[in-house]
Image: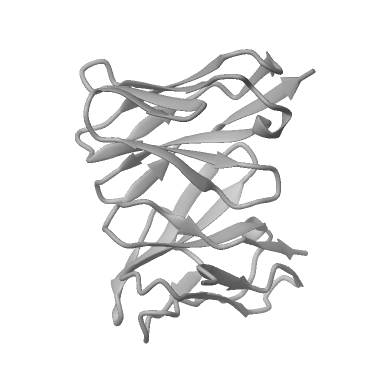
Amino acid sequence: GQNIDQPTEMTATEGAIVQINCTYQTSGFNGLFWYQQHAGEAPTFLSYNVLDGLEEKGRFSSFLSRSKGYSYLLLKELQMKDSASYLCALSGGYQKVTFGTGTKLQVIP
Amino acid sequence: NAGVTQTPKFRILKIGQSMTLQCTQDMNHNYMYWYRQDPGMGLKLIYYSVGAGITDKGEVPNGYNVSRSTTEDFPLRLELAAPSQTSVYFCASSYEESGELFFGEGSRLTVL
């Protein structure tokens, strides 16, 4: 099976940088997703890492280390609208895409 | 381009009632999925389909049924609703197997 761990909640200040970690245990996977989900809304795609290393997309970056079973999502220049839950998910395997429980990020002024 | 459309957005059911959540997508995706999301529990896969006429169980299929008669439509049927089925249900589709998921807006179901 697959197991994914993320912190439940985080708080950060507007304009700052925050790193949301995700650790996982799995017998194999294709890649790792990050999704953003605002309260009461559907998840939306942020990033997908297949290879080890950092993928940068504007204010958001995502990192993957397969050997360490570890990923993080880095959010720079935080804005109030970044307050949301961030879901780490593994691609591949019987369950197709397996989601972690998500990290609820609160951005404060 | 509407993407993935789910109906209804909200529904209250009595214990033992049945209903169907509708899902349709206009992106010509072969892969479609139903997830449920409970507070603090993350998204759990109920059923998925790899194409018209082909469906398979996910992690939490008990109490649900699906069908896939066309590429566009993937309805989820709840038979004999139970309070444990109170949840938010998301339909999703993808172009590739285990690829980027495109979600519908969700259906909030309460069973009393």
Query: Which residue: 55% across, 59% down?
Result: B90
Q: Quick check: can you spot residue A1?
A: no
Coloring applied to the structure: one colour
Query: Which residue: 31% across, 52% down?
Result: B99
List x then y, in percent, for residue B80: 61, 75
Within the image, what quadrant is residue A80 found in? Answer: top right
Farthest front residue?
A58
Image-based side of B12 in relation to B90, left or right: right
List x then y, in percent, for residue A68: 26, 15
Image-based side of B47 in relation to B98, left or right: right
List x then y, in percent, for residue B60: 45, 56
Location of the C terminus of chain B by quadrant is: bottom right
List x then y, in percent, for residue B30: 31, 71
Within the image, what quadrant is residue A17 found in? Answer: top right
Q: Quick check: can you spot residue B38?
A: yes
Comparing B28 with A98, the one in front is: B28
- In the displayed structure, B90 sits above or below A13; it is below
Query: Which residue: 20% across, 36% down?
Result: A28
